[in-house]
Amino acid sequence: MTPTAYLVLSSVTVLLLSYIYYKLHPTPLPSIPYNLSAPRRAFGDLRAIKAQGRLIKEPSAAMFAVAKNLGSPIAQLLLTSFSSPIIVIDDPREVEDVLVRRNREFDRSPLTTRFFQPMLPACTIAQLTTPALRAQKRLWSDVMSNDFLKRVVAPNIREAARELVELWGLKAEQAGGEQPFEVGVDFEDAALDAICVAVLGLKMGVTRGQIDKVRGEMTGGHDSEAEDPFADTRSSAAILRKTLKYLNDIVDAGFTSVWPEFAFWRIRMSPAYRRFKKISDNEMQRLMAGACERFQRLEALDGETAGEELDTCAMDLVLRREIITARKTGEVKSDPTRDPAMLQELLLFLLAAAFPGPELPSAADIVNTDIPYLDAVIEETVRVVATAGIIARITVVDTEVLVAVREDIRSATSQAAQAKRTRGGLDGDSGHDLHLFEPRRWLTRDETQGGKEVFDAFALPALGFGGGLRGCFGKRLAMQELRILIALLVLKFEFLPLPEKVASMEAEEKLFRRPKTCHVKLRAL
Ligand code: HEM
Ligand SMILES: *[C@@H]1O[C@H](CO)[C@@H](O)[C@H](O)[C@H]1NC(C)=O
């Protein structure tokens, strides 16, 4: 190399490195508060967020902490100039407005999609809003209809809840009513049982297996492996559970990396990921094939009564809708067992069911009876547990969000919504002491019904399921599930106070926030 060429090359290298170093310092947006020292540091707020995250094990709380320290309901988190700032809004009214009423300005954010991209790139939660996404959502829409939820899903959930009651009864007996025991996994099992039968028409029998196991322990542990009718579905459940664990394990890469795209690219390149993805995909294909077969058998019967078999599951609704759409558009119907969008959406449903935290009445009794305090408890539980630590959106056009919390500068839609909250919303009685669990904030007296106590769903902005076009698709199902589970459990058991060491409200956050421990101490009623 000639000296001149050498000089040019090294100058270019120095320039490039200086440029990169310069760009590692973040650039704030105008007129939104930020930590003034952040732009002067390479990687801005990243180190502070990471340190805080390690301390409290809740990455989303660490992000909110930056805003809290600035004493502002809105703040920017600054990383590098290679990416736009993350705007944190810690103001329920503004968040509700952005989610519910401003869908043209905001879309699902990469902060959410990136976690689902490696395993479930074709499912709705991993995608931005496009015409294809809307069609995909439409395909599944009947599944959350009131009729389907009440007629098909509710009885299945009730059956799962009944088995949970049976299991806890045995466990309480085993513990002699003295010892608290862990039930986090039991909730997951019951939720998996309920969703599998509701969506796929497949009885998983996960809780049934636990019941048999505990019963075996109590009667001297005879080995029931040989007569296990659920061996096959139990292996499906194990694969689903492993998939969920894998999804959770890769979350850290997205939260703490300066360059998450690279972190996730590396994951996708790893042999472990490929092996795992294959196992998971194959299992979904197998489950889908089973559901399709069942659907075709029912189609063949065409209206003849065949007892329980004719109780349709969600997959039946979706397959039927696909056939109708294909007939209308003249396109060939895709093979659902080879359609990634179909398989991955199904997997998302099965996994979403594993997230919720907690002579018996029938399902119809429970879903049709007006019990305002039960509704209030559920709403308050969803609010306090904050299953999704952050609800993330990306701006799709230039826009403004609150600059200061003055009523007159809120958006017109936000002001209109507040006017409809006759009890004052966050500024009224319901908004007191939001850090406390207080179901009564969701109750009010209805003067048109002689002062009867009623549930007020609009007491406060309810954000536990996100909202708007990209809000949680399973909300109605999840709320119904909570209603049936809680109703059966409180009717059957008295929940005794827990000893201090297991009575923790501490949470742990991966994909979702969940309790660190979940214990109960029960007396059967
Ligand atoms: C207590 C239980 C649940 C909670 C707290 C919850 C929460 C959430 C949240 C916060 C989001 C993001 C919403 C947003 O960005 O605005 C979401 C999305 C979603 N959830 Fe749930 N969820 C639950 C149960 C379920 C169940 C049981 C299903 C399916 C049967 C489900 C299916 C979905 C789907 C498909 C999306 C993506 C929707 C889209 O991208 O348009 N969820 N959920
Ligand atoms: C700004 O960030 C620095 C470094 O992380 C921190 O020590 C300081 O307390 C922050 N200032 C405010 C107002 O949060």
Image (tube, rainbow, N blue to C red):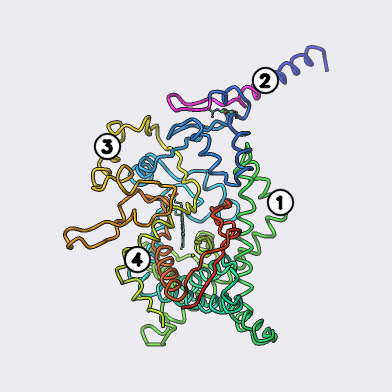
Whole-Å distance between the Cαs marked 3 and 1?
Answer: 49 Å
Decide which of tag 2 and tag 3 comes sooner along the chain: 2
Q: Please tell me whether mark 3 or mark 1 is closer to you in this view.
A: 3
State the SS at label 1.
loop
The percent position of residue 244, horizontal first and vertical second, equals 60, 60
- Of pointers 2 and 4, the one earlier in the residue sequence: 2
Q: Are marks 1 and 2 in contact (CB under 8 Å)?
A: no
Which residue is the site of mark 1?
270
Horizontal relation, residue 186 to residue 225: left or right: left
Q: Measure how far apart labels 2 and 4 are at the Cα level.
A: 58 Å
Q: Which residue is mark 2?
A: 18
Q: Which residue is mark 3?
A: 412
> Dot 3 lies on which element?
helix
To which quarter of the image does residue 62 belong?
Answer: top right
Q: Are marks 1 and 4 in contact (CB under 8 Å)?
A: no
Question: Could you tell me which secondary element the residue under label 4 belongs to?
Answer: loop
Q: Is residue 230 magenta?
A: no
* Real-space CA distance between mark 1 and mark 2, rounded to the nearest whole angstrom: 32 Å
Picture coordinates of residue 74 (x, y %)? 44, 34
C-alpha gap between disc 2 and disc 3: 46 Å
In primary-sequence order, the first of circles 1 and 2 is 2
- Whether pointer 2 and pointer 3 mark residues with C-beta atoms closer than 8 Å, the reply is no
Q: Position of residue 227 (x, y in %)?
A: 65, 87
Camera-side mark, 1 or 4: 4
For marks 1 and 4 on the same chain, the one whose residue lies earlier in the sequence: 4
In this view, the mark in front (3 or 4)? 3
